[in-house]
Image (cartoon, helix red, strand yellow):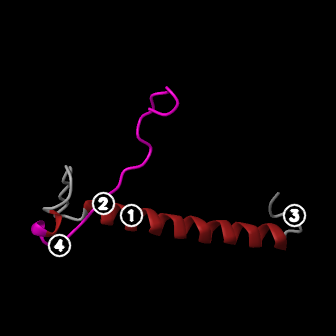
Amino acid sequence: MFSGIRALPVYHIAVCAKQDDALAGLPALSYFADAQQSVWAHYQQVIRELMLTDRYAHTLRERLRAAGLPDGP
């Protein structure tokens, strides 16, 4: 509650450790195991797609400039 207004949490904090006992003294936690590292794999895929999109946008800007057209706002 903040000034009488109820709000849902905006931030989530992840505390990670290689060994379980490193987390033992912390207050209540929710654990998430990702043995297949799917979150990391998804992140890598998104970054690859972003880089490809950026490269494509750069190529389009070059083509617009070569055609004597404006290349952006």
Q: Quadrant of residue 56?
A: bottom right
Q: CA distance from mark 4 to mark 2?
A: 17 Å
> What is the number of the mark on residue 18?
4
In-front residue for pair 44/26 = 26
Q: Position of residue 26 (x, y in %)?
A: 20, 58
Looking at the image, which residue sits at the far left?
21
Q: Position of residue 24 (x, y in %)?
A: 13, 62
- Is 6 inside the magenta-drawn segment? yes
> What is the number of the mark on residue 39?
2
Q: For mark 3, what is the residue?
A: 69
Q: Secondary structure at mark 3?
A: loop
Q: For mark 1, what is the residue?
A: 43
- Reading the chain from its start, which is encountered first: label 4 or label 2? 4
Q: CA distance from mark 4 to mark 1?
A: 21 Å
Label 2 close to label 3 by CB (< 8 Å): no
- Reading the chain from its start, which is encountered first: label 3 or label 4? 4
Q: Magenta stretch: give its range.
A: 1-21
